[in-house]
Image (cartoon, rainbow, N blue to C red):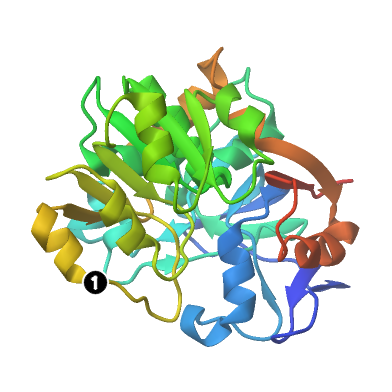
Amino acid sequence: MKAALFDTVGRPLRVDTIGDPQAEADEVVLKVAACGICGSDLHMTEDPKTFGIGQGVVLGHEFAGEIVSLGGDVSGFAIGDRVAVAPMRGCGRCDRCKAGEPAWCAEMRLIGGGYAELTAVAARQCVKLPENLPLSEGALAEPTSIGLHSVMRSGLKPGEKVLILGAGPIGLLVALWARRMGASHVVVADINDYQRERARSVGATGFAISGPGLAAEFERQAGGAPDIVFECVGKKGLINFACELVRLQGKVVGIGLCVGGDEWDPFVALNKEVTIVMAAFFNMAEFAVAIDALATFETFRPQALITDTIGLGHVPETFEALRNRTTQCKVLIDVAA
């Protein structure tokens, strides 16, 4: 099969032919239909040791596909089933896994494999897609679940004011869920305005340029300081910035993947009695809700994030281009193209 492979830091991914995967007893093999390129994938190739990846690894954890073979112990699925894949692979035996929370299993591994024609995953990672949802759009289930989980972690109450730092896919999906769950104001802030209209299309009530004047601009749009600030960028200093922006006794939710440490002044959070919450991954119930949203939402649809679809052969140059800020939002790989 063909796959886009990671070699080493500083070199583009390469498309090559490798052996087809075989299903273990508890696994299914998927013909991958589509896979999203995630900012986390970019981070992994810049700091592979932290993420435990090496030469020849196939990245890609936002994918959906069709089952083409089954392991001997698999039940509840059949060849031809259309599924989205939750990329957290737990042991399947512990209390966390049995509760549908494999992300917090002691043996959890974040799996890739979506940048390839075929991939093998544990059957318990798969959720069947509704017939009315195009298979390729099932690749959005993973990031849509991250957005949902982040808002659930925030404890958002209807009527609260929300500020989101970062207009990337996760920031925009947080905006979508915050609006769906009743936030009165949802303002997305970024250092560029490329995604201004897209933010509104997924439910944001406003957009602002991030910087020293952001607090005043948010107050102008929302009539007060934010109750909750979501940090969806993952750059040094932004958790501290979020603490400065949020109201007294407000909440800051850290979602952005900040690798290599951070710098902040805890006195700001202490003085304001800010609650700081971190959000990562999701549970399988949230994954199912995200799939339902993809199939049923008629307004503020996650599909609005898709800005381009490329073939597997174009992954290396597209991947490198995404290291720099572009007007792209979510790029899907159409593996069959």
Q: Is residue 21 above or below residue 208?
A: below
**Viewer-closest of 196 and 253:** 196
Query: Can I make out residue 144 in this image?
Result: no
- Residue at 39 percent across and 68 percent down: it is 237
- Residue at 50 percent across and 46 percent down: it is 170
Coordinates of residue 178 in the picture (x, y in percent): 37, 29
- Residue at 58 percent across and 74 percent down: it is 44
Q: Is residue 85 above or below residue 176?
A: below
Coordinates of residue 250 in the picture (x, y in percent): 18, 43
- How many residues crowd mark 1 within 10 Å: few (<14), some (14–19), many (20+)? few
- The picture quadrant where one finds residue 267 is bottom left
Q: Quick one: quadrant of the N terminus?
A: bottom right
**Viewer-closest of 147 and 85:** 147
Coordinates of residue 134 in the picture (x, y in percent): 69, 26
**Viewer-closest of 138 and 190:** 190
| Left or right position of 309 against 134 | right
- The picture quadrant where one finds residue 214 is top left
Coordinates of residue 280 in the picture (x, y in percent): 36, 56
Q: Is residue 305 above or below residue 211?
A: above
User: To which residue does mark 1 refer?
Assistant: 265
Q: Which residue appears farthest toward the top when viewing the image?
A: 298
SS class of the residue under badge 1? loop
| Left or right position of 109 against 134 | left
Q: Is residue 174 above or below residue 185?
A: below
Residue type at mark 1 is Asp
Query: Can I make out residue 57 in this image?
Result: yes
- Residue at 57 percent across and 44 percent down: it is 169
**Viewer-closest of 256 and 93:** 256
| Left or right position of 63 against 267 | right
